[in-house]
């Protein structure tokens, strides 16, 4: 008999199947045993009668500890009251491994305890749902770009120099040299875009931030598309289409998981392009209008992002920020050189910046001047300047952090729950 | 008028289009100019007549250096003799940026020169073809697992301990601790498989090998599926289906690129499951039979792999290797505890090991004994042992190196050409 996964039970209605899984929960009436079994794709209730499975099997199952592994055979029966719509009428039970006393119980545990047991905590209903949503978001990201002719070009993890500042870099002993772990694949994506037209990098990036807030990981995944011949307008369009696609995909594929997470999906249904677009100058006025402190030239903090987000029911594109607070590689607006041709997409519900991007400076003299002005090591950027020396073209792109996006879609404020094994200031295990 | 990509020209036959790209090559007859323009998706010949584009444009284009960027408008004309089947009859030419003298010329360059200019070398016909094949292989890998209900669970890059030995680890300053860059996501994938059933990790992995051969990178991508309830037989089946899928996908989607690479695809057409399966003991006898030195108990080197591969026209699954030369976590064969329930898939044409995998030891006492015997730090493996403490189940999986696979499919012996920005013992730039 074939192993059936809980997710696929509808296909087996009325048939005998084998379920292989772990005991999630159970209750007994003395003659009937209700076993909730999880197999990684879902949880199904299996109903075992003593007279059917026999005295011995019944007793073994009746005393089985949580998370023991077992193989159950039985017939799939449709039942409207069951969470997935189906139950199993058990014909036989085989215990594979009797678990020791499981450390994670239905009672409340502290965050440290759960993180110390992350390798087991992953098995819980909510944590496994979050990881399945993460999987759906990854797939949405890749499908979006693959379907539009982008080529995935992985950026190197080992870099000789910093893209943005040096204070938050992790240093590696690279044979007899020093290397640093990448903070962004963008500069490499720019080179690849000149070779392949439309590209994206999607891999882990690293920030040695000494911050303990719930928004920070030292290791997180980032996707960074880069498009030759794209100007700011094109980048904004790509960003809103991209976010809309991810949200629609997750709403479609992760319905059950979002239900487990008790996510209010009405707030996500509304996330459809086009998004409201406001210039930084307009945004400053709107934030100030809510009574939140804000002056032209300053960066947004969480209060400013939340004040602005409260005025809209969709992600907001804020474009043309003061050049002085943005990265050296962003192109200045010819119509107003005080501002850069860049955008941030600010998520709703207090999730903050989802996307940061820009049109890139494509003029060799301008970019050289900027590198000098910011006191960056010219030698390290020699190859990057070459992109403006040999057939320079307008181009642009953005970065989206995977974990922050998953956190928003799942409606969880704790970014550490959106990656299988989070790494933080004080967390390097398990 | 819409920008058309060279790859899509068939859709625009007979229509006016805009091509945005870089000058790859040109020749002139005085009155007609043949411009080969590349846009990242392909190269198209654009035919410009002086009387149509005007004296000034003609002259600008006629003297334009290689890799200058330009925008060309014209009508798409089917032409059987053209490489992609189409040419452009140019109506206007706009030069966007006049390139400086391009350092990479059609003449031969040394490997060091090309690698120093990797950011530009990517633009060449062959290098961009290899990167497009890499993209197709990545997509095949993800589609294969996603389509079979696997959940992508990214393993952490920062690890506190080594999975296999410590001599080839990269050390990172992690705040006031030491961390090491991951060599394999497998142990984490095992934890995730107990939570989600079928999972895969797919990310960069690191080996500080002081080797300069054409087969070694310090940073390379690896995909590692892990399946709860899978035994060796299931893992072998998964491995051959997986490789067959990747090859069929690449043959279908990368036809043009494999032509550019002059790949003999006849040798790939044959890569279809089932693969020949031989035990290590049988393989040793077969290798010895070819006259190559080989004794039971030794690992295969390149000569042994090549000797074995020469006897078959498909990848070969070699299973049940001596336990003593394999990793501690592999399950011993109950029928013969000298050997492990493991497999290597050895690729044809001298490409060596494509896959290494096994059924994992699922018995707590056995695994503990192994960790002690190999003098591994017990404390670091406490969480890993927990997987055998709380509902242990048979499980297994394998790892496949992306770059080696791309190298095989492309038919290039130089693995450094199969990743956008390779990192090697003496190579950390650009």
Image (cartoon, coloured by chain):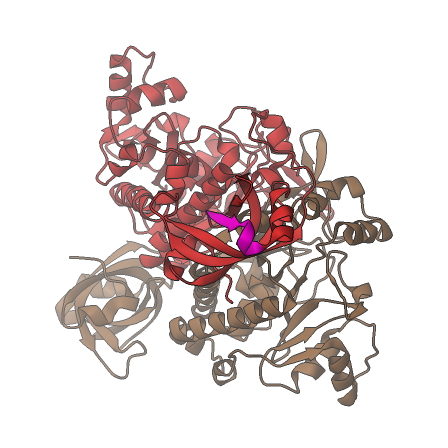
Chain colours: A brown, B red
Taking the spot 47% from the left edge, 80% from the top edge, the residue there is: A262
Quadrant for residue A164, please give it: bottom right
B211 part of magenta stretch: no
Taking the spot 58% from the left edge, 29% from the top edge, the residue there is: B167
Q: Is residue A380 left or right of residue A372?
A: left
Image quadrant occupied by the N terminus of chain A: bottom left
Between A387 and A188, which is closer to the camera in this rendering?
A387
The percent position of residue B256, horizontal first and vertical second, equals: 37, 44
Position above or below: B92 against B282? below
Q: Is residue A64 left or right of residue A310?
A: left
* Span colored in magenta: B42-53
B46 part of magenta stretch: yes
The percent position of residue B63, horizontal first and vertical second, equals: 64, 42
Residue B362 appears in the picture as rendered: no
Residue A64 appears in the picture as rendered: yes
Between B114 and B67, which is closer to the camera in this rendering?
B67
The percent position of residue A197, horizontal first and vertical second, equals: 54, 53
Q: Is residue A136 left or right of residue A313?
A: left
Position above or below: A179 against B147? above
The percent position of residue B215, horizontal first and vertical second, equals: 49, 28
Position above or below: A227 against A272? above
Q: Is residue A25 left or right of residue B108?
A: left
Count every numbered label the image shows and give the total: 0
Quadrant for residue B413, please give it: top left
Between B287 and B256, which is closer to the camera in this rendering?
B256
Between A401 and A125, which is closer to the camera in this rendering?
A401
């Amino acid at each position: 008999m074939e192993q059936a996964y809980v997710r696929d039970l509808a296909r087996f209605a009325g048939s005998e199947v084998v379920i292989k899984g772990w005991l999630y929960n159970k209750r007994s009436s003395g003659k009937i045993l209700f076993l909730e079994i999880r197999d990684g794709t879902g949880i199904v209730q299996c109903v075992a009668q003593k007279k059917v499975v026999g005295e011995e099997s019944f007793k073994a199952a009746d005393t089985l500890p949580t998370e023991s592994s077992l193989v159950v055979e039985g017939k799939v029966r449709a039942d409207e009251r069951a969470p997935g719509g189906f139950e199993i009428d058990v014909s036989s039970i085989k215990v594979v491994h009797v678990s020791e006393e499981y450390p994670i119980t239905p009672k409340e545990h502290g965050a440290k305890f759960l993180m110390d047991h992350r390798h087991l905590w992953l098995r819980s209903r909510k944590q496994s749902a979050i990881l399945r949503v993460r999987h759906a978001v990854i797939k949405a990201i890749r499908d979006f770009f693959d379907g539009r002719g982008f080529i995935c070009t992985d950026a190197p993890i080992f870099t000789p120099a910093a893209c943005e500042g040096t204070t938050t870099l992790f240093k590696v002993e690279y044979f007899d040299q020093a290397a640093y772990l990448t903070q962004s694949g963008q500069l490499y994506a720019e080179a690849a875009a000149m070779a392949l037209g439309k590209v994206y990098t999607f891999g882990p990036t690293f920030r040695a931030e000494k911050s303990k807030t719930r928004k920070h990981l030292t290791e997180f995944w980032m996707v960074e598309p880069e498009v030759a011949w794209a100007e700011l307008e094109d980048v904004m369009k790509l960003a809103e289409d991209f976010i809309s696609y991810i949200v629609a995909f997750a709403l479609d594929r992760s319905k059950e998981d979002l239900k487990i997470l008790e996510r209010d999906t009405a707030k996500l249904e509304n996330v459809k392009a086009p998004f409201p677009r406001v210039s930084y100058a307009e945004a400053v006025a709107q934030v100030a209008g809510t009574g939140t402190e804000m002056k032209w030239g300053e960066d947004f903090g969480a209060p400013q992002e939340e004040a602005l987000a409260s005025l809209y029911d969709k992600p907001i594109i804020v474009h043309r920020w003061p050049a002085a607070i943005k990265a050296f590689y962003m192109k200045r607006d010819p119509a107003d050189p005080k501002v850069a041709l860049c955008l941030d997409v600010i998520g709703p519900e207090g999730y903050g910046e989802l996307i940061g991007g820009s049109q890139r400076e494509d003029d060799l003299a301008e970019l050289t001047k900027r590198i000098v002005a910011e006191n960056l090591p010219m030698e390290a950027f020699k190859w990057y300047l070459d992109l403006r020396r040999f057939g320079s073209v307008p181009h642009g792109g953005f970065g989206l952090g995977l974990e922050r996006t998953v956190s928003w879609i799942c409606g969880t404020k704790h970014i550490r729950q959106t990656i299988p094994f989070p790494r933080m200031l004080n967390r390097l295990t398990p």
